[in-house]
Image (tube, helix red, strand yellow):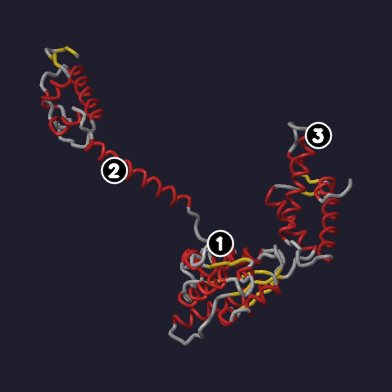
Amino acid sequence: MKKKSGIDMSVFELADRLDIRNKSLTSTEMLEKTMEAIDKMIESNMADFSEIEIPKFEDIAPALSGDDSAHKKTADEANKNSDKAVTEAVESEEKEPEPTYEELMEELDALVGLETVKEDIKTMINFLRICKLRQERGLKTPELSHHMVFSGNPGTGKTTIARLLSKIYKAIGLLEKGQLVEVDRAGLIAGYQGQTAIKTAEVVQSAIGGVLFIDEAYSLVQGDNDSYGKECIATVLKAMEDNRDQLVVIVAGYDDLMHKFIESNPGLKSRFNKYIHFPDYTGEEMEKIFLLQCKSNGYQIEEAGQKLLRDVFDRMYEMRDENFGNGRTVRNTFEKIINCQATRLAAARGEGLTNDELMKLTVADVREGLGMEI
């Protein structure tokens, strides 16, 4: 209650005399507006309410009596629209521009080793680009199968190449979305009879417009009595035929096992006619991968440590078998060595370390990481 210039009334009595036009105010907002009007009148010594412009009282009277549902709904809708606008703005700001064809080819060239793989990929892409140009000009183009078999030991870059290919295919207009969906047997086979086809179809659907990459694809066939595997393969083969212009399937695994896998089913043999072999990394190439790991993570290795590491990588390559880890071995070795460096620094100095000390990998770190006696 406030009194000035003959004004002496309650908030509700005042509200009865106010000219209210806005129906979207809640009870709290209406009360705030009313109090603002009172203060304004008192400050200006006004006794006539006709000049005050705030919402019409009868339109919001239910809110004052506790019936706030209509106004709450309006406020909720406004909040939702606001949240949606903010989300869309953030997503638009965070979304990075898609790489160009030229940038993707530079990324391909920058990969360590894989020279024969790069040449195969470039030849294939050049052919596809010319075929697309012929098609745009109304010239005849041969019917092509874009599905491929990647064979080689683990860690030779098969997934990396598949991911790059999916982006390149989008850049040249072969695929609409260019996403890579990576799965193995566990991601395709269900636990009960009849459910595998459904599970596999769902995975395939998620890959439409991009690349379906099936790693260790030979594991889909586990003997003549494996009805689950046969159901999965039949579903994939049908999807490949039904979506030949919207889906690329790449199957990957060991050389010998992939050969047996393709030969096990006439449908597989007819649909996969492009084979790319991924050779093992040499000791020199493993060293380059390690140095790239150092550079990208802000480490520098001592010359003696680098020489020791190269000798070890050379011996690994010479003694390799089907379990040779290639790039994975390099990444695991890098992680072990930087962990050894961290243990050494924490024990020796703790705080007060220089940047050079934090970045340097010593020969002792390398020996420790490789499990050698110092």
Q: Residue furthest bottom?
A: 140
Within 10 Å of disc 1 (Cα), the crowding (few <14, some 14-19, many 20+) is few
Quarter of the image for residue 225 reads bottom right
Which of marks 2 and 1 precedes in the sequence? 2
Q: Secondary structure at mark 2?
A: helix
Q: Is residue 345 left or right of residue 196?
A: right
Which of marks 2 and 3 precedes in the sequence? 2
Within 10 Å of disc 3 (Cα), the crowding (few <14, some 14-19, many 20+) is few
**Viewer-nearest of discs 1 and 2:** 1
Q: Is residue 20 left or right of residue 220?
A: left
Q: Is residue 24 left or right of residue 138?
A: left
Residue type beneath disc 2: Glu
Q: Secondary structure at mark 1?
A: helix
Q: Residue at x 19, y 17 (%)?
A: 42
Labelled pair 1, 2 in contact (Cβ < 8 Å): no
**Viewer-nearest of discs 1 and 3:** 1
Labelled pair 1, 3 in contact (Cβ < 8 Å): no
Residue type beneath disc 3: Ala
Q: Residue at x 22, y 19 (%)?
A: 39
Residue bearing the label numbered 3 = 348
Residue bearing the label numbered 1 = 187
Residue closest to the eye, 284 or 224: 224
Residue type beneath disc 1: Gly
In the image, residue 119 above or below residue 140: above
Q: CA distance from mark 3 to mark 2?
A: 60 Å
Numbered label attached to residue 77: 2
In the image, residue 272 above or below residue 299: below
Image position, residue 351 (x, y; %): 73, 31
